Image (cartoon, rainbow, N blue to C red):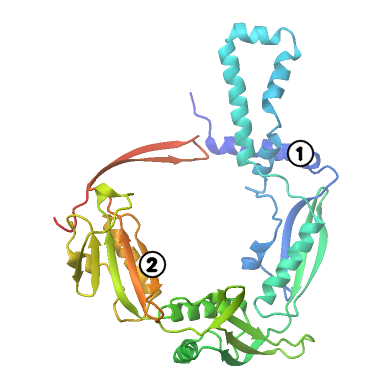
Amino acid sequence: MAQPNLSKLTILFLFIISVKSCKSIKEIAGDKYLLENNIISKNNEELINDPVKFIAIDKPNKKTLGIPFKLYLHEMAVEKPDSLFDDWLDRKPKRKKLLNDLLSAKQVNEIKRYKFSFNNWLKRNGEAPVFIDSSATVKNIQRFEQYYKNKGYFNTKVEVQTVFSSLQKRTVKYSIQTRDQFTIDSIRQEINSPVIDSLYNLSIKKRLINKGDPFEIDRFEAERNRLISYFRNNGVYNFQQNNIQFIAAIDSSGVDTKIPVIVEISNLQKRENDSLKNIQYKIHNVKKINLYIDNASQLGQLSPFTDSLTYKNFNILYKGKLKYKPKALEEVIFIEKDKPYSDFSRALTYRYISNLRNFKYPSITFKPVGNTSDLEANIFLSPKERFSMGFDLDFSHSNIQDFGFSLGSSFGIRNIFRG
């Protein structure tokens, strides 16, 4: 027997759906209008793959070969499928008995369960109809204007027009006029702390905002992050990002498009009693490094560390027998004694200790030494069990299959340092 041609069956299926859609769109829309498309143009040029297209709140229903299959799946789903099935079963007096005799009560319940599961599948894979919504249109206008203002186009205006697409569908056209882009004019700094002022001037050649650059919010965010990283990697371990402010004087008339900028970096504020005290930032050097190692058999017990040794520039505190070579521990600690505090060194130490897989996630803290600007680094390590066996369960969902299941086992011996 000849096998049916798959491509012909596909074309037939699409034809049936498309014929059905002629009736369904009117039924779905009712007295509303489905959103057919959002057409966005900037300075009289239509945008195709521009990022601004993706910030619209409402997007048309997705289509495959011009047909909104997901929309139809959504419309096929019903509320309370269990009740509807029971109503259908009881609508005719003999229907339930006939099905129970023909199949069985258990199989009838299976049909009900299947109908419920299929209905949930329709809801999951379907897509609710997207209608023309004036409130969404207003929000889109606000989003488009804000997007371009963040790019330095402070005089951006957006006009909107709803046009006829078909009987129950409409297309919304957004026309964006950006006008001139504002640029950075002069830059000066107002920095309260001499230490921060000195560090700022040392890094000024790497500044990400400069005279003549477009006045873009992303540039200022990047510069703020650069400064925070630079300060915290050069000894200012307690620097706070909210101490950096960019002050810009924008001409409200929109005539002057050159903006002078002030980089303002204030002091650290510390609460004392009921008032805030301004404290100048300082460079903090690491004066002491302590490494605390729990005994795996005593994890969770609040017992003191009874033994200690000093290896090169750090102290190791432990209880019982030390099962790790000090040299091996030193190789994964990048925090340096008598050097300025560094976020980078701290993160690198975290990463290398974690990569050993001999310890649980480490804890690294810093605290001032007395009333000085020096710091004490404390690294806490909790060993994992030397022998471990684990089972990993992995569930993966598929649109084709209900679910996937895999079971993996692993067995490891952790003996890196004394092997």
Relative height, residue 41 to residue 82 (above, below): below
Which residue corresponds to the image point at 33% horizontal and 67% vertical from the top-left?
Answer: 378
* Residue 161 percent coordinates (x, y): 82, 64
Amino acid type assigned to the residue bearing label 1 in the image: Ser
Relative height, residue 231 to residue 104 (above, below): below
Amino acid type assigned to the residue bearing label 2 in the image: Thr
Left or right for 360, reference 64: left
Relative height, residue 1 to residue 95 (above, below): below
Mark 2 highlights which residue? 365
Q: Nearer the viewer, residue 219 or 203?
A: 203
Label 1 neighbour load within 10 Å: few <14, some 14-19, many 20+: some
Q: Nearer the viewer, residue 386 or 377?
A: 377
Which residue corresponds to the image point at 41% horizontal and 80% vertical from the top-left?
Answer: 371
Residue 24 - label: 1
The local secondary structure at tag 2 comes to strand
Q: Is residue 221 visible?
A: no
Relative height, residue 13 to residue 417 (above, below): above
Instruction: Tell me which corner region of the image, top left, top right, bottom left or bottom right, holds residue 162.
Output: bottom right
Query: Residue extending furthest right?
Result: 31
Left or right for 176, reference 1: right
